[in-house]
Amino acid sequence: MELDAWVAAVSRELGVDVPVDVDLLLDLARDAAHNVERKSAPITTYLLGVAVGRGAAPEDGAAAVRRALP
């Protein structure tokens, strides 16, 4: 399955109706994986999702995460 189709399918199943900035998420996951450890990538994107769910803009949340990177 192609990535955009996967994102659409998962969004539909979860009842999530928001735009997904795939490039932002992949870049952030890469930065976390390379600067912390590989396992930090999904945890980091999850935490960003929680912050966005609480009202943070995705770009602002990603900037905050990058400030926390070693």
Image: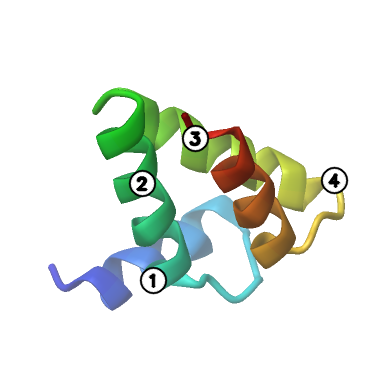
Query: Taking 54 as reference, is 55 above or below it?
Result: below
Work out which residue is located at the far front of the displayed protein and give it. Answer: 70
- Quote the CA–CA distance across marks 1 and 4: 21 Å
User: At 36% from the left edge and 46% from the top edge, which residue is drawn?
Assistant: 31
Work out which residue is located at the far left of the displayed protein and give it. Answer: 1
Q: Quadrant of residue 55?
A: bottom right
The amino acid beneath tag 1 is Asp
Residue 35 in the image: state x and y as whole percent. 33, 33
Upstream in sequence: badge 2 or badge 3: 2
The amino acid beneath tag 3 is Thr
Could you say which disc has been placed on residue 31 in the image? 2
Q: Which residue is mark 3?
A: 44
Query: Taking 8 as reference, is 65 above or below it?
Result: above
Q: Which residue is mark 1?
A: 23
User: At 77% from the left edge and 49% from the top edge, which residue is drawn?
Assistant: 53
User: At 13% from the left edge and 67% from the top edge, which residue is drawn?
Assistant: 1
Q: Secondary structure at mark 1?
A: helix
